[in-house]
Structures are given as structure tokens and as C-alpha cells.
Amino acid sequence: MRLHRIRLRDFRGVHDREVALAEHGVTVLQGDNEVGKTSTLAALDLLFDAADSSRRAEIRAAQPAGVDAGPEVEAEVSTGPYRFTYRKRWLRRPRTELHVTAPAPEQLTGADAHARVSAILDETMDRVLWRGLRVEQHSGVGQADLGGQDALTRALDRAASGHEAARPDPTVDDGLVERAVEELRRYRTPSGRATGELRAAEVRLADAEAEHDRCRAALEATERDVAARDRLDADLGTVRARRRAQGDEVAELEDRWAGLQSRLREVEAAGDQAVLARERADAARDRRAARDALIAAVAADADAASRAAAARDAHDAEHTTAREDRDRRRADDTDARAEATRARHAADAADRAVSAARDRAELLDLAERLRRVGDAASGLAAAERAQAAATVGADDLAEVEDLARDLLRAEAARDAAAARVELTVPADGDGLTLDVDGETVTLAAGETRTLPVAAVRAVSLPGVLAVRVRPGLDDAGRDDAVREATRALAGACEDLGVADLEAARAACRAAEDAARRAGEHRAALARELAGHADTAALRTAHDAVRDRLEGVEATTDDVAALRTAAGTAREEAGTAARRADEADAACRAAEDAVRESETRSAVLTERAADARHAHARRAEELAAARVDEPDAALADAESTRRDRAREAEREHETLAAALAGDDPDTVEVLVTNARAVAERLTGEVARLEREHAETTGRLQAAGAQGWHDQLAAAATELEAAGRAHETVAARAAAARRLHETLARHRERVRRSYVAPFRAQVERLARIVFGPTLSLEIDEDLRITHRTLDGTTVAFGALSSGAQEQLGLCARLACAALVDPADGVPVVIDDALGHTDPERLARLGAVFTAATAAQGAAQVVVLTCTPERYHGIGAATVVPLTPSRRPGADSADDRDDHAGDRDEPARPIDPAPATAPGTVVDLPRAPRAG
Amino acid sequence: MRFVHTADWQLGMTRRILGARPPKEAAGGLTGEAQARFAQARLDAVAELGRLADERDAAFVLVCGDVFESNLVGPDVVARACEALGSFRTPVLLLPGNHDPADAACVLRRPDFARRCPAHVTVLDAPGVHEVAPGVEVVAAPWRSKHPLTDLVGEQLAALDPAPPGTLRVLAGHGELDVLDPDDDEPARIRRDGVLAALADGRVHYVALGDRHSTWTDAVDDRIRHAGTPEVTDFDEVDPGNVLVVDLDRHGAQVAVEPVGRWRFLRHDARLDADGDLDALDARLAAVPDKERTAIRLALVGTLSLRQRGRLDDLLAAHAHAFAAVEILEQHSDLATVPDDADLDDLDLHGFAADAAAELFAAATSDDAEARDALRLLHRLVGSR
Ligand SMILES: [Mn+2]
């Protein structure tokens, strides 16, 4: 398709403007913002797409404000074999007109015109490519989606296959793959899972299988129960019969067992009898043994009696010897005793002589002591009399002494405090005699006498002068104290009956002297009375000694001699006494020996008698026993009983052996076992009856369930579900197969398209980026990577400028590749804002290179910055200026030459009035109203 | 003495060809609409033969086995059967057959049957002689289990003495005669020689059999008969849908075959190679009367193009709405679908799509069903463009 001319009337801000475009190469429409560049493009889309009756938002937006006219667009286009002029007005008096001039003239209006243009465009032009090759304002950096473009695909197909001739039919893909995908998605998700109808069929099939299995299992269970019931009926009969037979066997075995039991009891009785007989035999044997023992005992007793008599007789001789010895010892003892008595009397006489001599000495001493005691007693009486006369004791004296000291202290105090009168005779004077208080006092020359004035003192130089000195009040008081003390002292002395202190002291000393003498006399008394209580006792002792000596003749022997004689006599008496004791002891020992011998004699006599008696008794016993049972009878009984016991034992053994031969243990085991079998059979019958009842119950319940009907329905449903699933699965498989086949073929074709497309894009891009550039392009014809100077960068990571430049190269490559017959204009609305000036210059060369070929595509550039596109060598530049409504804001009124727009449509001029690259603003008069 | 001889009512039977209950349909029965009508038709046949018995003054109706399709039919089937039995007066004798043997689960002894069963109905579940009217005895040979190990009829006949004078004896049995199905391995086959001998020496005067769903008469002695099912049950039945009205005396039996069934199970074989064959099939199906009571099974052979196959599918789908069932019997069909050049040209594709179509075409021609389906889908997608 090529655009020759576009005319806008009352379209947005454009009042009326016509733009003519170059048929080949680049047309640059340059003008300020808001001048209506983008409106031109939008108007073209509306012209082709929107019916004149449409009121969609873009159309309402195209309505100029405050004007009673609908927006109107007219374009002259050639495409394929067609060339036509097409005009549309919307909103106010909508209208569509079409004038086809080639290949055959046609004139259509209204919906027919719209339909015809749509048909022509569909037939001749790739409308998707038309949009894809457009770079919109402010959105131009990305890549065009070129993968599905028919025209490009055809061009690439041609390039890939080397065919020059384009294929006549355009309907190659047209969304077939997308529809195949849609069809596949009805059955499977992108991840391959079943969905929709297929999923529903699978679910239905699975449900049907489950239901069928459930019903079949139930039915089979019921059939098993039917079979089980038959089997149980048969088993019950069999087991009941066996149980009856077993009952009979148990009864038979129990009878046998009872018989064996009674025989067992017989054997036990025989055993008891054997034991009894054996016990009796043992008793007879014991009695015979006892008789034998008795006989032996009688013999032993006789022997013992004779031995005891012999012992008694032997002892009688020894006894006589002992008595004779004793008598002899008794005589010896009497003699020794007489000798001892005589010696003792002699010793006693010697002792008495010694004692009388000692008493006489003592009597002399005691008489002397009596005399000294008399002297001491008279001295003591005199001293005690003197003591009683004394009136002043030591304490009394101390009291008087204290009072005298008090008087001295009072006088001293008075004298110290009293005024003094100093009487001084001048040294150069003569002695002088004074009378002081009545006393005469003589004073030598230079002597001074001081007189205290405690009381009134009278000093007189008799005759010359009489001085009386009186003390003051205080001095008088002290003098009173002295007087008081003096009175107290005097009182005390009077009480003691002494004159004064000295007298008191002398009286006191006399009293003390008397006391000392009394003490000395008492000491003498005590000394002489030592050992006696008092004088009377001493006298009594004296008298007692004197009395003892009364009648004793006085000897002259001295005491020492007497003592020696006494000692000798005492020694002799001791020796005699010892001898007497020894004889006495020997006599006593002999007496003891005689007594012991007598005792032993008695014992032996008794023993002999006892042995004799014992023998006699046992002999009597034996005799009595023999009377009861003679020895021969006992021996007889023993042998008889023993034989009887042996017989009973043999009988028992015989019976027991016979019973063991019938094996009662085995019979017992058989009875026990038979009973267990019967019990088990009873249990078996109960179990079978229970199972029978359970099975019957289950069968009754199953009857009401209608399992046959359910299974039949389930089987039918399973078959239907299986068929339905098969059908859907086949459809799903077909969809997958179709999609897979289509996609595989498309991919193969696309892979073959990549090479020529890349060659063309790289040719153009190297102009911008230099000769080292290479590109990677995927099967959707998108640039994925750029390699420059050996460095590979993903497209998305490139700078905005580089992306923009490569995107432009790709679009221009498309424009260069597609067949002139299929080509569509490349429209670039103010792109390349990210491109630096140096690259801009190179891009200019790209534009030229892309449009240089014969029949290359139209390129329309809209820009408000024309310097961006100065580098395009072969560009046709069309400056646009505002096309304002006359009278709107400009006084630039021109001639009012145009006809009334309200007239029926102006005839479309089939021939363009203007040359390419020109712009004609057609100002018209403002419409009325 | 007149009685009605019938058998094989098969109450509770469903047929898969009649279709499942449509999925997702609300509860209200286990089966689909055609199944329900088929079930009702079996009950109607019972009511019809009862009405016939009443009309002809029959002494009794003798049902020789398979009254029910199974011992495990539901209470609803039992209840409706009892209703049908109650719609007439003539006494009915029911013999347990191989489908409803007198085993532990026997439906004829079930409490729900016993409770609803009308008074004039007798169950012959005990083998031996039953006096059903003065001078009339029925010798029953009921099935006691699903797999008997002897000839039940022969067993009964062997135990019989000749009938007393003035007494007519009818034997009621269920099973195939050995001449009809000489399967040596089946111990329950009825020995025809024994039956003929019993008829000859007067132990019985008529042998009423069930199990064979087609009406059948023995070639040697016409007193040996299968009544057949009163309503068709399968495609392979020769003459179903009848009951026998028997007039019996000591010398012979006069038997009238009376149709009571209303359904048909048809099979149709056709060769399909050209559009004309499809036209003929279409016309043939259209000409079938009583379609709503007819199930039809098709055996198709031939070769069709994609387009023709599509036409066949459409044609069958259209008829399926009218018939109780239309089914292609796969094991007897050999219908190839091979795309022809016209199929490919119709697509009018170019570029890679054309290549893809050519690949699928090649595969479909060499009997790749999936490729064929894919090609048909491609047709549809191109057509919807
Ligand atoms: Mn049957």
C-alpha cells in the first residue's frame, strides 16, 4: 500500500489540511507540537477501520470544540492493483464515499464503500504488518512483533526458498495455529494436564469403574454367601452326626473306666491287710526279744550283788586301824595343853611387877603438877581483881583522844581566823613586861608576840595602859566552837572518872597490864592440866594411881630388869602354846579320818544290800513272766505271725499285677480325650450354627439391596463412560497431533526465515554500529542478542538508544524485504529521542539504504525536531504549520472562495491537485451559526 | 385342560445397548429412559399374557424358570412384578430357573416377594409332583443352585410312575435339550431320550421347558416345547415375544402360539463405499417402524472418505434420537476411513500449514486413526475461519 495524499477537515485542531507524500523513500513531516502530526496518523486508522456511523471515543475526541461540523478524512491510496480515493465524515451528517480509479472505475457510498475498502485492504495488504511497522510517539524503543506477519513471512519465504514469484494466495496461516492451540486447550492445560471435557470424561470413567467394582464386589460377596450357606448346611449335618457318635463312644469308655475303678479299690484293701499282718509279726518278734533281755538282766544282777559284798568286807579292816591312831593322838594333846597353861601364868607375874614400878613414877609427877596448878590459880585471881577495878578501856581512851583532837582543831581554826595583835618591842628598846589577860608576859628587845583575838583580850602595861581587844562577830563564833569542844572533853573525862586526858591514858595502861598477867596464869594452868579436864580430874587421876599402889610391896628392882624378865617369860609361854595347837590339830585330823571311814563303811554296806534286793526283784519278775508265757510259747507265736504276714503280702502283689495288666492309665487317657473331642464337636456345631445365622442374615439384607440392578446399571454406565472417554480422548489426541504437526512445520519455516531477515537487519545495523556487529534473532524474528567487538549483550540489557536504533533497523529491514506489492508504509512518529547526534547521522544513511531499492517501501517520519532527520539524504521534507479556523485567533482572513460544506459532498477529485511534499491549507469562511 | 406355557420373563433385565442414565442427571432411577421403557415392556408382556389366560379360561399359567433376571434384583423390581402378577386371576406357577435358583438367596422366597405375592401364585421350589387341580399334576424340576451337577428333569422323570388314569401330568423344567446344545461338558443338559421315553410310557403328557428365549418345538414329539421369552431380550433370538396356549389331553396337545411382545432387536448388515450406499442406509433406517421400541445393531463394511465418514456419523446420530438404540457392531464391521484428494483440496492451505496437512494426509492414508481425526479437525478449523 502507498499513501499519496491525506486530507483532514475539522479534525481535532486541524481546520483543513492536505498533505501529499512521496511515493518512494522517506517523507519527513515536520512541525511544532500540537500542529497535528499524530492526528494525521490517527485519522488514517479511523478512515480504514471505523464506519461513518461509529461514535467511538477516538471519533468523539476528533470532533473540534465549538464547531457544528463532523470530523472528515480523505485519503488517496494505491494498493495492489487498486487505486482509489476514500472519504469519510462522522457524527454530523456522516458520509462515506469511494472512487476507485484503477484497475476499473467504481463509485460506492455508505456501508458498501466501507465494505469494499475493507475487502480491498484485506486482499492486498497485511494490516497487522501495517500496525507492526509503526513506531508510535514515546513508545518507539521496543521491537515490533514481526513473527506472524504474512507479508514479511512471504518475503522471508521468498528469500529463504529463492523463489522470486510471490504465491498468489494470501491465506497461509491466518491464525490457524492459534485456533489449533485453542482446540488443544479445550482438552489439556499448557502443562499437559487433562481439563474440560477430557477431564470430565476421565472422572466419569474413574467414577464408573469405582462404582462397578463396588457393585461387583457386593454381588460376589452375596454369591459367596449363597455358596457358604450351602456348605454350612452340609457341614452342620456332618458335624452333628459326628457329635452324636462321639457321645456314644464317651459313654462306652466311661463304663469301662468305672469297672477298673472298683478293682482298684480291691487292690488297695489287700494292701492294707498285708500291712496289718506285717505289723503283728513285728510285735511277736519284739516280745520274744524282751524275754531274752530279761533273762540276761537277772544274771547281771547276781554278779553285781556278790561284787558289793566283797568291797564292804575289805573296808571293815581299814576302819579299825584308823580308830586306834585317833586314841593315841588324843593323849598327846592333853599333855601339851597343861604345859602351855603353866608357862602363861609365869609370864603374867613378870608383867605385873613391871606395871607397879611404872605407877610409882607417875604418882610423883602428878603430885608436882597439883602444886603448880594451885600457884597459877591464886595469881590468876589477883589479876582478875585488878582487871575488874579498871574504868578506862581502850575504846574509851580512843573516844577521849578524838575529843581532844577536835578541841585542838577548833582552837587552831579560831586562831588562824582571828585578828592578831602583834606586840613588838623595838630592838633598840628595853625589855618590857606586859600583862596579857591577867598573865604576865615579858618581851625582850626586838621580840615580837602575836596575840590572836578570838575573844576579848586584855593587854595592859599595868598601869600605863590597858588595852582590850574584842573580836568581831565571826571570831566570836569560832571561839564558841572551841568552848564547846572543851566542854565535850571535860564531860567525857568526868564520865570515865578521870581528871583529864593523861589520867585516862594511865588508867587504860593499868587495865592492860592486869589483863596480860591473867593471860600468863591461864596459860600455866592449861599446861599443867594437859590431858585432864580440870584440877579435880587431875586430882582424881593422882588418887587412882595412889590407890593402885595400895598393898603392893615396893621393890627395889629397877624397871629395865623387870622388863627383861617379863619378855623371857612371855617367849616361853608362846612356844608352849604353839606345841599345844599342833597336837590339837593332829588329834582333829585323826578324828576326821575315823568319821570318813565310818561313812564309807555305811555306803558300802548299803550298796551291797541294794544289789541283793535288785537281783531278788528281777528274779521274781522273770519267774512271774514265765508263769504267764513260757519261753517256748513266745518263740512259737513269733514264727506263726511271720508266716501270715508273708502270705498277705503275696496276695496283694498278685491282685495289683492283674489290675496293671488291664492298663487303667490308658483307659483314663482315652476317656479324657473322648470327652474333649465331644466338647470340641459341640463348639464346632455352635460355631457353624452361628455362621449359618450370620450368613442368612446377610443374605436377607442383600435381598433388599438389589445388587443385580445396581451392577447392571454400573456396567452400563461403565461401558458408556468408556465409549465417551474413548471418543473424547481421540479428539484430544487429534487436537494434540494437529497442533504438534502445525507447530513443527511453522517452526521449521520460521527457522528458515531467520537467516535472510538477520542478513537484512545486520546490513542496516552495521551502518550504525560498525562492521563488527552481529545479531542473534529467534524464530519469532525478535532480536535477542547483539554482539559488538566480540562482546555479546542481551537485547533487554542494551541502552535505550541502542534498542531504539536496532528496533528501527528491524522495521526498515522489513520495509526493505517485503514485496513492493505487499509493502506498507513505515510510519515513525517522533522516535530516536534517545539517539546521540553521531548515531543520528548514521541512521540517516540507514534510512537511505533501506529505501534505495527500486519499489522500496514508503517511510513517513513525523517529527517536531527536524534536525534528528537531517541526515536522511533522500528525504522529502514537508513542514507543517497550524491550520486554524478563520477568525478563531487569527485575523489572517483569506478569500472566502470555498463552497458551502453543507452542500452535498464535494466531488472527490480523482487526480491529486498537489505535488508530493506539499501542504495546502485551505482556509474557509466560518460557517454560519 | 388348557394352560398357558411361558418362561424366561427375565424381570429386572437391563440391556447395555439401551444406554446409561445420562451423567449428572438428578437421582431418580438407575437407568436411562430407554432402559425404563424396556423394563416396563417386560411387565406389560406379563400383564398381557395374564389377560390372555383369563380370556381363554386357562387352568393356570406355568412359568418355566427365570421369572427374574437375578435373585439379587431390587425390591422395586419385585414389587412391580407382583403388581403385574396381580393384574389377572388365573393361577400362576413359578419355577426357579438358572437365573433365580432356589438357593439361599432365592428371590421367590424373599420376604418382600412373599409379602406382596398375590394369593393365586405358587412357587414350585420343591421338586416333585404338585397337584394343581383335580386330575392335573405338575412335576417340578426347579433349579436349586446356579450350577447343578445332574439332569434335573431326567432325575424327576426317573422317579415317576406312570400317571394314574384320569390324571394329566405336565413336567415343568428349565434348561437346554442335549440335541439343541450338545455340550458334553455340561452335566445339567436335559437328556432328550429320557424325556421321549417318559412321554411314550405316559409318565408325563407334556414337557414344558424354559431357558431358550426363542419359541421352539421338538421335531419328534411336539409335546416337548420351549415357550421362549414373552418379550425379546437379545439380537440373536429367532422367534421371541410369544406365549403358548396349550390344550392338553391324554393323546396329545393343541398348542397356539400367541405373540405378546412389542419390542424388536434388529441387526442390519450394509456395505458402504459410496454416497449411494449412505443414501440406502439412511432410507433403510428411516423405513423401520416402531423405532422407539426397536434397538438396531449395524454391521458395516467398506471404505469411506473423510467427508463421507462425517456424513455417516451425522446420519447415525440423527437416527439414534428416534430409535431405542443404534449401535455399530464393531466385531462384525470393517469400515475404513481413507481421506481422498478432494479432502485435501478442500482445505486450500499454503505454506507450512499445507505441509502439515500433507503430512497428516499421508499418515491418515496409511490407517493412522489419530492422523485422520487430526485432519478432520483441521477441516473444521479451516472451515471456521
Ligand atoms: Mn433365561
Image: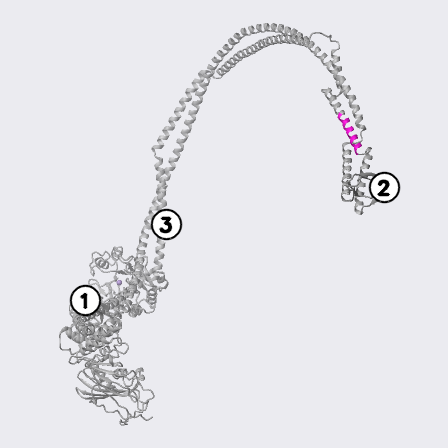
| Residues at discs 1 and 2 both on one chain | no
Q: Could you classify mark 1 by the number of other residues whose Cα lies within 10 Å: few (under 14), some (14-19), or many (20 or more)? A: few
Q: Which residue is identified by label 3?
A: A686
Report the front residue among A681 and B30. Answer: B30
Relative to A569, A377 lies left or right: right
Q: What element carries label 2?
A: loop
Query: Pointer 1 indicates a residue of which chain?
Result: B
Say if the magenta span includes residue A502.
yes
Relative to A67, A565 lies left or right: right
Query: Residue placed farthest to the right in the image?
Result: A463
Q: Which amino acid does label 1 sit on?
A: His
- Marks 3 and 1 in Cβ contact (< 8 Å): no
Q: Which residue is identified by label 2?
A: A462
Q: What is the distance, in whole Å, between disc 1 and disc 2 at their CAs? A: 213 Å
Q: Which residue is identified by label 1?
A: B332
Return the x and y of residue B109 as percentages of the image width and height.
Answer: 34, 60
Q: What residue type is labelled 2?
A: Pro
- Residue B182, by quadrant, is bottom left
Return the x and y of residue A773 as percentages of the image width and height.
Answer: 19, 70
What segment is highlighted magenta in the picture? A501-516
Which part of the image, by quadrant, shows the N terminus of chain B? bottom left
Is residue B242 visible in the rendered image? The answer is: no
Q: Residue at x 74, y 21 (%)?
A: A524
Which part of the image, by quadrant, shows the C terminus of chain B? bottom left
- Residue A813, by quadrant, is bottom left
Q: Which amino acid does label 3 sit on?
A: Ala
Return the x and y of residue B165 as percentages of the image width and height.
Answer: 28, 59
Of labels 2 and 3, earlier in sequence is 2
Vertical position of residue A695 compared to residue B338: above or below = above
Q: Quadrant of ligand 1?
A: bottom left
